[in-house]
Amino acid sequence: QSECLSKSLSKVFTFPFASHPPLLLTLTRRLASAAPNVVFSFFNIEKSNNVLFSNLSCNNILRYDVSDGIPEGYVFKGTPQEDVNLFLAVAEEEFRKGVRVAETDTGLKISCLVVDAFFWFCGDMAEEMNIPWVAFWTAGACSLAAHVYTDLIREKSAQLIGSLGPNEEIVDLIPGLKAIRLGDLPSGIVLGNLESPFSTMLHNMGRTLHRATAVPLNSFQELDPDLTENLSLKLNKFLNIGPFNLTSKEKTALQFDEFSCISWLDNQKTKTVAYICFGTIFTPPPNELVELAKALEETETPFLWSIKKDATKHFPNGFLDKITTNGIGKVVAWAPQDQVLNHDAIGVFVTHCGWNSVLESVGAGVPMICRPFLGDQHINSWMVERVWGIGSIIEGGSFTKRATCCALEQVLSLSKIRHERIQALKDLAHNAVEPNGSSHQNFKTLVEVVTGATRH
Ligand code: U2F
């Protein structure tokens, strides 16, 4: 009983897709170790929890499974984001149920909600319970700003649509960002389906987030000083607490080297290898896989390619045999990406610009060739090429042999200016997580919110 009195309970809700669950769990682990008196109940769908908790034991983190919203016997129709939409339809109800379950299980009263920022409805839940709402944004300040300012962007761009194409730059469309192209905004803001469940969720999030007690994100403030300054005025406790790949060095399930990538890299020359990976959900269309493979052959670039096994059937005939014989490339179903990027042999990262990939590349000082697909990936790519100057977006927006050869040659023969920019950002990222660094200090503020040391 006395132990219970000194304890409190925080509830963590994760968006159960892509890299969101491991990131939310990393945040939870950091908080659980900084606040040993707080019990964290971690809510996620069963399939994802099975992976996350396979080799994790932590006294003050309790695992809870929620429904994925897939009705029994459901046959998938193959519509876009079908699994996500099914989950979103039940998410609020599942999480509300979860509050009661966690309180009954532990005998503790919930004192804080730590949730993926997507779940804007948690603002109401926190208000009803009179507890802090910590809304964690898993990506960068640039995409968050696009969602926070969606109404303003729609208003400003209303007259421009039709007269301006998706590739023309617009100045001052997003406060804190000098320029952007409409085509680089996350879809569902101005272009694409504005009414889909996903777009609606993000729009609601952007409108509600100012009510959150704290908005931490996986980034570091020195990367985006203007956006940080702007969003700090708009949101309560806007806290850059990353990059997580630098703050949390414990080996996660992501970091196992099942396919011996590191020993293969050990035999390659410094800064010569292209590492290719498009994150946890996307694979480029078959024709682009062929073009990319041909460009690697043409330029004789050594490469390590992480790609789902199923997709390798789209490679040009004989491609896999040839690279096995001449040893110029290695194709794997999974690579310990952060370790790979930090290997001396890596000269360039060919990426979809998912936020974690961008941060891992920045932290390792590796330039990028960007081939974004959706969501925040276009705006991240814009930042990489045009704002930070540490990579190139593939010309024409998709892999062709010609554009890919040019990009590989250009990025691998790194210019002095680009090299200096990359090194400078890498240093800033590493400094931010030092004990006196901005991210470290911001994390302390977050711990105060979660432990109740700061009233909301
Ligand atoms: C969604 O992004 P993804 O999960 O597709 O991509 P990333 O944010 O880049 O995260 C991929 C993570 O998986 C790791 C890699 C990253 O930490 O190191 N990984 C690996 O270790 N080995 C592999 O072979 C493959 C991947 C979304 F699509 C993006 O638009 C968002 O920016 C992102 C964050 O919200 O979530």
Image (spheres, rainbow, N blue to C red):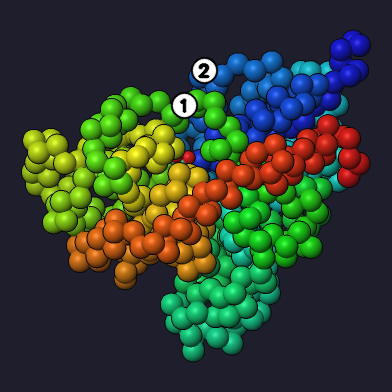
Image coords of residue 453 (percent x, y): 89, 35
Mark 1 crowd level (few <14, some 14–19, many ≥20, 10 Å Cα): some
Q: Is mark 1 within 8 Å of ligand 1?
A: no
Q: Residue furthest top?
A: 1
| Dot 2 crowding, Cα within 10 Å, few <14, some 14–19, many 20+ | few
Name the quadrant containing residue 43.
top right
Q: Which residue does the image show at 51% across and 71% down from the upper left? A: 191
Q: Identify whether 108 is placed above or below 232.
A: above
3 and 94: which is toward the camera: 3
Amino acid at circle 2: Asn
Q: Which mark is residue 67?
A: none
Q: Is residue 164 left or right of residue 7?
A: left
Residue at 46 percent of width and 58 percent of height = 420
Q: What's under tag 1, amino acid-wise?
A: Ala
Q: Is residue 84 left or right of residue 313?
A: right
Q: Does mark 2 have its CB less than 8 Å from ligand 1? A: no
Q: Secondary structure at mark 1?
A: helix
Q: Which residue is mark 2?
A: 55
Percent position of residue 261, x then y? 30, 31
The residue that mark 1 highlights is 253
Q: CA distance from mark 1 to mark 2?
A: 8 Å
